[in-house]
């Protein structure tokens, strides 16, 4: 009888502890952290959304493709790097290709992409930077290198009837420096660059 009572009491204590910790850590803590985020960094807490004309067009943290329904790159826009996330920039399937540098399929894909990028932009294959032909580890990187952005200037200027100097200046004004001045490499956010391009003409 005593053993049964002890067992029941133990289960009751465990149940109460679970309910208390669920309320404190699962509900209260989440509400407090969310509230602090909304007060201190509302844009970041809401997913760093980017808006244009009052509509959300994406996030500054997640890349997207600038292609038609068939996946053909639109020549009037700056193009992002390749993505291995699902069908491309799928936030629900973030991943890299997981293929090593000596993988025959990866090497073939890079060579094919290099030829496509060179032809699309009217440049030599030797001028195509690495990020133009390789996916990021997450498959969702919203940035490209300044070299890749500048490589696309002549094509975009021709498609839009704009002076190359104006498009080049636009790219240079959007280059983000290394974090803290020394971490990582300079980058360009493709979505934000394309929104600025739309305003340019």
Image (cartoon, helix red, strand yellow):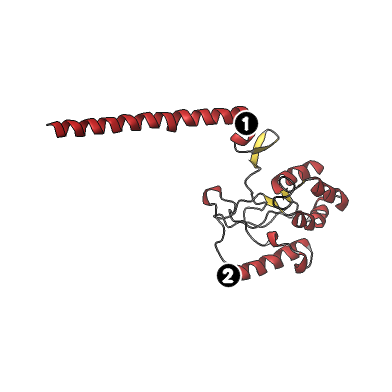
Viewed as shown, does residue 4 lie left or right of 85?
A: left
Marks 2, 1: nearer the viewer: 1
Name the quadrant containing residue 148.
bottom right
Quadrant containing the C terminus in the rendered view: top right
The location of residue 18, given as percent across then percent down, is: 34, 33
Depth check, front residue: 36 or 7: 7
Spatial distance from mark 2 to mark 1, Cα to Cα?
43 Å
From the image, tell me which residue sits under label 1.
42
User: Which residue is depicted at the point 52% across and 48% down?
Assistant: 92
The location of residue 89, given as percent across then percent down, is: 59, 51
Q: Secondary structure at mark 1?
A: helix
Marks 1 and 2: in contact by CB < 8 Å? no
Name the quadrant containing residue 10.
top left
The location of residue 112, given as percent across then percent down, is: 66, 68
User: Which residue is depicted at the point 73% across and 54% down?
Assistant: 145
Q: Residues within 10 Å of mark 1 (few under 14, many from 20)?
A: some
Depth check, front residue: 39 or 25: 25
User: Which residue is depicted at the point 56% across and 61% down?
Assistant: 97
Mark seen at residue 159:
none
Viewed as shown, does residue 185 lie left or right of 165?
A: left
Numbered-mark total: 2
Depth check, front residue: 105 or 44: 44
Q: Is residue 43 above or below residue 174?
A: above
Quadrant containing the N terminus in the rendered view: top left
The location of residue 161, given as percent across then percent down, is: 84, 51
Q: Earlier in the sequence, mark 2 or mark 1?
A: 1
User: Which residue is depicted at the point 59% across and 56% down?
Assistant: 137
From the image, tell me which residue sits under label 2.
105
């Amino acid at each position: 009888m005593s053993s049964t009572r002890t067992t029941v009491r133990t289960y009751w204590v465990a149940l109460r502890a679970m309910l208390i910790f669920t309320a404190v850590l699962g509900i209260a803590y989440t509400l407090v952290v969310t509230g602090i985020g909304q007060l201190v960094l509302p844009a970041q807490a809401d997913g760093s959304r980017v808006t244009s004309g009052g509509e959300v067009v994406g996030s500054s943290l997640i890349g997207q493709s600038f292609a038609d329904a068939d996946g053909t790159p639109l020549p009037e826009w700056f193009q992002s790097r390749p993505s291995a996330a699902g069908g491309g920039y799928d936030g629900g399937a973030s991943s890299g290709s997981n293929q090593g540098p000596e993988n025959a399929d990866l090497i073939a894909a890079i060579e094919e992409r290099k030829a496509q990028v060179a032809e699309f932009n009217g440049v030599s294959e030797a001028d195509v930077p690495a990020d133009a032909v390789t996916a990021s580890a997450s498959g969702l990187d919203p940035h490209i290198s300044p070299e890749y952005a500048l490589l696309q200037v002549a094509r975009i200027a021709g498609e839009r009837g704009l002076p190359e100097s104006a498009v080049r200046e636009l790219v240079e004004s959007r280059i983000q420096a290394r974090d803290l001045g020394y971490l990582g490499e300079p980058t360009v956010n493709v979505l934000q660059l394309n929104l600025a391009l739309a305003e340019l003409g």
